[in-house]
Amino acid sequence: MFDFFKRKQDTSTEVLSMPNEEKNDHANDASKIGFGYAATESARNSVQQAAKRFAKPSTYTGNRNLYDSGGAKKQAKLNLFKDEAEVIDPYTGNKLVLTKQEARMMYGDEWQKHLAESDHVKPLEQIYKDTKDNVWATTDDINNAANSYDNIRVSSRKFNNPKRSRTNKEYVENEEYLQSKGVELTEGGRQIAIRDGEIAEKSTSKQINNASTKNAIKTGHEAGKYGAKNAGVTALTMSGIMNFVAVVNGKKSSDEAIVDTIKDGGKAAVTGYAMGGGLTVVSHSLSNSSSKFIQALSKSNVPGKVITAVIVTGDTLKRYGNGEITTQECLIELGDKGLNLATMGYSMAVGQALIPIPIVGGAIGALVGSALTSTYYNNLINTLQTKQLEHKERQRIIEECNKAAEQTKVFREELEDYLKSYFKEYKDCFNEALSSIRFAYQAGDADGIITGANQITRKLGGQVHYETVKEFKRFLDDDLIDIL
């Protein structure tokens, strides 16, 4: 059973240790771990900052003031009346005046039909609902779009007051409600209101989407610069110390040491920019995922930790895959790097506490911590390799391994049974639905085809928007539904 740990070229039963000339340079590994950890932590901090910047209230009630602008509505009225020109309500055809006093004095009990009021064409509550899950739009972005020219219209108080949080289309097409509120529209007023609603919908959506795109790019760039700085300085510090030692030991000239240090810092900065920016954008984008699992991965910075682990262990796995090192050597290197990766955060924190120079203290702590960890780990490996296990102890371990293998077999069988039953349920559903679709197609039954497709959609947890061809046509004609 110990063949698993032998050299590929060796046929003896002796477990060999890794020759010194083939060992990885632990200091270089520490540098990779250090700047990878620094970049990952930078991304985590950037994600936290992004979460604060793009946070939105959980409810619309009590937070309307975040999206409303009294100044914008006031300015819209003043712009209409600034030349003392006659102002007409575009929906009711009534003449409008600027102040309540004028309206009461000129029109008495009918004053509400003539008092000018500014209205958000697309209601603020609807805008809130449409944007509350947009992780890249700030409340200021939403406020600017909500109070832009295309979304504010001046109409009479009689028209505006009953509208509340209804869209223009919902409002003007509800004849019964309009009659109950005494709202009378002109022949073309209804169509003007619907057209204004369509313009407002497209304009506000476009403005918010543009702002979101710019915010994502800007946030990624800023996070990338922050990551590049932290990773670059960490690598420069650690590489500088290592190269200084190499010069003292006569292994490098001073010129070679300077070139290698700058090269290490440059590579780390480029990697830090990519990791810092990319991880921030991806993690924040996933922070509002419908999947709680994805949200948890994002918040715990798992993507960053995985990338750091790949950076650290990639070279070892590549050499093992190419047959350059044995299984035993691969496992020893991975164990060393894994232990370093696990303890690096604590080492950097201690170093920063002892040397309170931003980033530099953490880099030195990482280098010292890595050296201590690697020394301890290698001593432990050497002890385990050279010590001969007593016969009884060896037999006990073998027995435990056999028990573990049996338990693993049971777990595997249980898993296979579960997978078979799980996928059978979906397979049966798909077979039934596809058969229905095929027969419906042959019979020319379009509704039947839709029914079969909806069966699959529901099984996969999707949302069904129509059941018949008639409903499908209505769905396509509905401008308020965003199929994307």
Image (cartoon, rainbow, N blue to C red):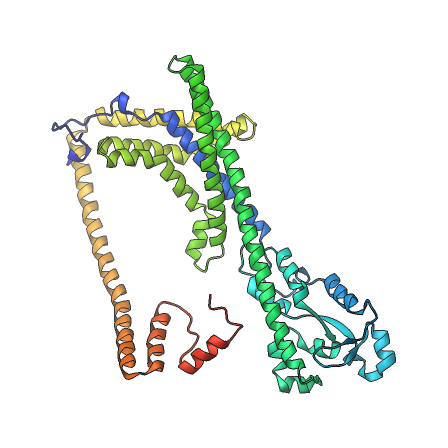
Above-or-below relation of 313 to 70 = above
Residue 388 appears in the rendering: yes
Q: Nearer the viewer, residue 422 or 228?
A: 228
Q: Residue at x 67, y 85 (%)?
A: 187
Q: Nearer the viewer, residue 29 or 275?
A: 275
| Count of labels in the image | 0
Q: Quadrant of residue 3?
A: top left
Q: Quadrant of residue 89?
A: bottom right
In the picture, the quarter occupied by the N terminus is top left
Residue 347 appears in the rendering: no
Q: Quadrant of residue 429?
A: bottom left
Where does residue 231 sit, x and y in percent of width and height? Answer: 48, 34
Where does residue 265 sit, x and y in percent of width and height? Answer: 47, 29
Q: Nearer the viewer, residue 190 or 308?
A: 190
Above-or-below relation of 88 to 209 = below
Where does residue 348 sit, x and y in percent of width and height? Answer: 48, 31
Q: Residue at x 43, y 19 (%)?
A: 257
Q: Nearer the viewer, residue 85 or 184?
A: 85
Left or right: 419 as drawn, with respect to 309: left
Left or right: 445 as drawn, with respect to 128: left
Where does residue 395 sit, x and y in percent of width and height? Answer: 16, 36
Left or right: 107 as drawn, with respect to 424: right
Q: Residue at x 63, y 80 (%)?
A: 191
Q: Determine the residue located farthest toward the left in the rendered image.
A: 11
Above-or-below relation of 113 to 62 = below
